[in-house]
Amino acid sequence: MVGILCKGRKLNMKFNKKLENIKTYEAGKPIELVVREFGIAAKDIVKLASNENPYGCAPKVQEAVSKIVANMALYPDDSMMKLKLALTNRFDIAEENLIIGSGSDQVIEFIMHAKASASSKILINSVTFAMYEIYAKHIGAEIVRTSSQEHDLNEFYELYKSEKPDVIFLCTPNNPTGDAIDAKAMMDFISKIDEDTLVVVDGAYMEYAAFKDEKKAVSPKDLIKEFNNVIYLGTFSKAYGLGGMRVGYGISSPKIIKELYKLRPPFNITTLSLEAASVAVLEQEFVNECISLCFSEMKRYEEFATKQKIDIIESYTNFVTLCLNKNHNSTQISDALLRQGMIVRDLSGYGMNALRVTVGTPEQNSRFFELTAELL
Ligand SMILES: *Cc1c(COP(=O)(O)O)cnc(C)c1O
């Protein structure tokens, strides 16, 4: 490998001041880097760090994508007709209620640019998806956090009244803790929020929560029927097994969708991704089988935690959060696991002495139990 190439002198260039305090988002460590750093063969590496579906996507999705790989010269269908039709049918909504992003991440970015300015406040849960803060900082907006680890809607309401945020993020089920908000309580909360405050309901793991407990199931249609100032976010990266395709969506009132569209770059979804997601929506049976397997494997994590005397947060997602006790350090444990080819998420950056572990296949989970038991 060559060394870093740059001209000897230090670059004397000033950048946008808003970027000064942003920590670059650290995605789950890619398998490719573990191969390079530790010399472990890719086949011996288990990645349980980014909450992907370990069973991948439905076979029909792969078939459909392989049929169109010959047609990559033309730009994608920028009207996204096929995917929009599939999603409007799925959720019983209109096309005017829908925007597609390169991952729901991109929709979060649009939301921030559309609604926030440098004088805005953005209200989020104390521990939650890191990208809300990063996109807020792009704008120069101020982040206001609750103090409780789980979404406490009373505290959200108090902070809403005192801080007057422009955007409120509710992540349910929440990443990286896995707990979920009661759907009815959430609807009550939103009904008390004024129309000029945008409430974002991030349902990246909603398929899991809805499967496990209908009280946690939030319907995007109900949300937008009740409220004009709400946007629901969904993604194909988790339950649908298409993390590599980068497709997510926002469902909201036409006025909000129209504003977000002004920020959308042309052709933001590739031809292959559009095809994959359109077919994946129709394969609900496959998705449900994967979710069912996930929850039966999750029982093994609960047993493991009991046996090892560590706390596990009840999860409505495809990952578990293991809270270590004082004798153990989550950074050391995750580093030691990494050296053996097991990639999990250390939550020390969130102020927690905890590991977030994606529920994998039975073999992957067994490997995790084996390696972690040795370290605890
Ligand atoms: C994974 C995730 C997303 C976004 O995923 P994309 O791959 O960008 O669609 C959004 N919110 C939460 C809470 C997530 O965990």
Image (cartoon, helix red, strand yellow):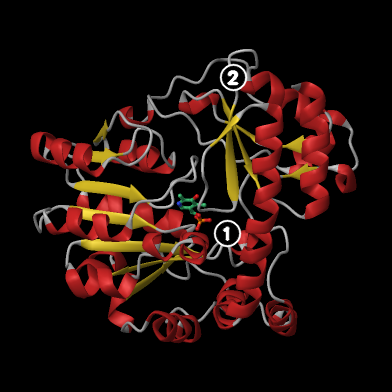
Q: Which mark is residue 43?
A: none
Viewport quadrant of the N terminus: top right
Image-based side of 188 in relation to 161, left or right:
right
- Between 91 and 114, the residue placed more toward the observer is 91
Q: Which mark is residue 238?
A: 1
Residue 3, visible in the rendered structure: no
- Between 43 and 173, the residue placed more toward the observer is 173
Residue at x 69%, y 75% (from the top left corner) = 58
Residue 140 rendering spot, x and y as whole percentages: 26, 35
In this view, 171 is above or below 57: above
Q: Residue 325 carries which label?
A: 2
Image-based side of 198 in relation to 179, left or right:
left
Residue 372 rendering spot, x and y as whole percentages: 76, 30
Residue at x 16%, y 36% (from the top left corner) = 159
Residue at x 59%, y 19% (from the top left corner) = 325
Residue 146 rendering spot, x and y as whole percentages: 27, 32
Q: Quadrant of residue 88?
A: bottom left
Disc 1, ligand 1: is the CB inside 8 Å? yes
In this view, 223 is above or below 52: below
Determine the secondary structure under disc 2.
loop
Which of the marked residues, 2 or 1, is nearer the chain's N terminus? 1
Give the tally of numbered discs.
2
Viewport quadrant of the C terminus: top right
Residue 80 rendering spot, x and y as whole percentages: 46, 80
- Between 181 and 230, the residue placed more toward the observer is 181
* Pair 2/1: label in front: 2
Determine the secondary structure under disc 1.
loop
Residue at x 24%, y 40% (from the top left corner) = 122
Task: Tell me the amino acid under the disc marked 1.
Answer: Lys
- Between 37 and 200, the residue placed more toward the observer is 200
